[in-house]
Image: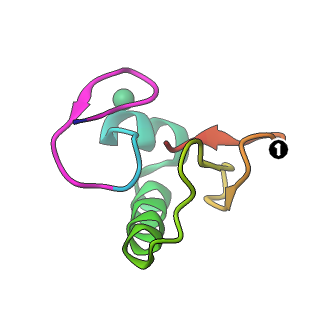
Amino acid sequence: MNKCVYCKQIINDERAVSVCDGCGHRVWGEKMFNAIKQNMDNAKQKGDLNQGSVCADLKGNVKSCEEKGALRLI
Ligand SMILES: [Zn+2]
């Protein structure tokens, strides 16, 4: 079962990100969050999603969680 990393709400679909729509839209905006979800789903399908923490900045670029301005996706 997937849980949102921000509000701990249970996520019922099979998305690659562990962020619910409410939090995703609040942080990135609806359009950007949909793009991030799609990118992450593609990465998961290709099997090149890192286990553990994955983050993105406010522009939707997936990056290391150690970098400044990174917000957690997983
Ligand atoms: Zn949430």
The type of colouring in the image is rainbow
Viewer-side residue, 65 vs 58: 65
Q: Is residue 70 magenta?
A: no
Position of 49 compared to 37: left or right? right
Query: In the image, residue 3 lies at what x, y percent?
Result: 31, 31
Query: In the image, residue 10 lies at what x, y percent?
Result: 22, 29
Furthest residue toward bottom = 46
Q: Amino acid at mark 1?
A: Glu
Query: In the image, residue 15 lies at what x, y percent?
Result: 30, 55
> As displayed, is residue 66 above or below residue 43?
above
Furthest residue toward top = 7
Position of 55 compared to 48: left or right? right
Query: In the image, residue 32 lies at what x, y percent?
Result: 50, 59
Q: Quadrant of the N terminus?
A: top left
Furthest residue toward right = 68
Q: Quadrant of ligand 1?
A: top left
Q: Which residue is mark 1?
A: 67
Q: Which residues are magenta?
A: 2-15
Viewer-side residue, 20 vs 42: 42
Furthest residue toward left = 12
Position of 45 compared to 68: left or right? left
Residue, x 55% and y 43% (percent of image)?
A: 52
Q: Is mark 1 within 8 Å of ligand 1?
A: no
Q: Secondary structure at mark 1?
A: loop
> As displayed, is residue 47 above or below residue 54?
below
